[in-house]
Image (cartoon, rainbow, N blue to C red):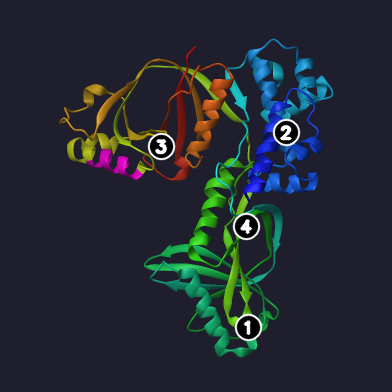
Amino acid sequence: MTYHYDTIRKTMDYIEQNLDGTIDLNEAAKAGAVSLMQLYRQFYAYTGHTLKEYIRKRHLSNACALLKFTDTPLVEVALLNGFETQQAFHKYFKSVLGVTPYVYKSSEAYFYFTPTFHQEIPSFPVKVEYEMFPITLSIMYSTRQQNGIEARAISCLYELISEYPFLAGNILRLFGRNIGQTENQFQYELNIAVKDMALWESVFPNRYFPKTTIRIEYSGTYASCIVKNEECEILSGWNYLYNTWLRASMFTRSQEDFFEEYFLKEKENRVQRLKLYLPVKKNQVFRTISIQELPAMSFIINVQPGVDKEETSARLITNFLMDHAPNIMYQATEFYLSYDTTYYESGIKIDDLSALPELPKSKEVELIHSPPGSYAVLEDDCCGDYSIQRDHLIRWMLQHGFSKKEPKIFTIYEVKNNNFNDDQVRMKLYAKCDI
């Protein structure tokens, strides 16, 4: 796996070194010491981008920078970034960004697509494919205990087969998904593709599965990876797929259900491996950074030295405000976050300092102020990966001269209508400009 990691890193380095010239795919593969076909597979698994699309997006991002920060003629911008004609560049630019190069140059927005690469070595190679799933028999397992619900559902299925031996060997494919909680019951749905549907329907309802339905064929685009049937590896697989791979890929989650497929060893009545399916759709991978003139902002925060202190910092600031200024806590709609390798800060934005009651002196909290001036602002949804977007914003500012050294980044999570659901929370990253 380390070998693959080095391959992708060296390939990306080659692409960056040749952005202003011709990028030869065979030379890119040679830089990574693999064949071109191997590079295609590994690059997609590690980044979520096809190699050619990644190069096109990097070229377009480079073109955006030339348009904004230089007087390079449009035809030269096109030729420098791999386009044969100005017309081809104009057409692609508008199809991706929604505006023409001329409109973009005079606008206040800054589009960018930075090199994205997982900082950890992936343990779960990911495939993205259009999948078709068969008609299945859907059976529901309910229990009061959530932990281990998947294993208990499978165990009950095996017990059912042992009571009705004629069902043995009749399973073609087996899928499962968490349904959630209904009243005081947790539910897990098994979907079974079988050879003889009537044979299976004859044993329902029963003491294991009182309810059954037929689920029709369906299809969609899914990112998937295969894991061992071990709870820690299943959790690690989902965590990597959703929180690491997806955030850095050219995809976003679609609205279909995510689920697992079980690979059975029927003679031993056990599950060997699982395939995790995450529904995805193409994402607008270009982010927009705006330069805004902002007034001073005030925050009451807790600072924790060290790393991985988010929970501690958030708990301390919350407890302090609930004890001494509960109204501030209840009315809060903007929440502050900042961290690096040496500290972690979390807190609440204070819009009206005159409304802040006199607080007792404490080592747990402090009042800080961001100075007025020009800020680079990057907005994303609340599920966006903070660390990835933070790195993107820092790199963008350094590359384009908005900061002479690595700037401090702070983030404000804005909550709408006191609703903390994902679609009601926005994440905005701020960095003070030197200019």
Residue drawn at point x = 51 percent, y = 52 percent: 239
Q: Distance between the residues labelled 3 and 4?
A: 35 Å
Chief SS of the magenta region: helix
Q: How far apart are marks 3 and 1 (CA)?
A: 54 Å
Residue drawn at point x = 71 percent, y = 54 percent: 130
First in sequence: mark 3 vs mark 1: 1
In the rendered image, residue 314 lying in the magenta stretch gets the answer yes
First in sequence: mark 2 vs mark 1: 2
- The type of residue carrying mark 3 is Lys
Q: How crowded is mark 4: few (under 14 residues within 10 Å), some or many (20 or more)?
A: many
Pair 3/4: label in front: 4
Residue drawn at point x = 51 percent, y = 40 percent: 384
The extreme top residue here reads 71
Q: Residues within 10 Å of mark 1 (few under 14, many from 20)?
A: few
Callout 2–callout 3 Cβ contact below 8 Å: no
Q: Distance between the residues labelled 4 and 1?
A: 25 Å
Secondary structure beneath dot 4 equals strand
The spot of residue 361 in percent (x, y) is 16, 30
Q: Name the residue under label 4.
A: 225
Residue drawn at point x = 48 percent, y = 37 percent: 386
Looking at the picture, does residue 210 appear above or below residue 432?
A: below
**Residue 267's disc number:** 1
Callout 2–callout 1 Cβ contact below 8 Å: no
First in sequence: mark 4 vs mark 1: 4
User: 322 or 272: nearer the eye?
Assistant: 272
- The type of residue carrying mark 1 is Lys
The spot of residue 57 in percent (x, y) is 69, 32
- The type of residue carrying mark 2 is Ile
Q: Name the residue under label 2.
A: 55
Q: Name the residue under label 3.
A: 416
Is 33 on the left-hand or right-hand side of 122? right
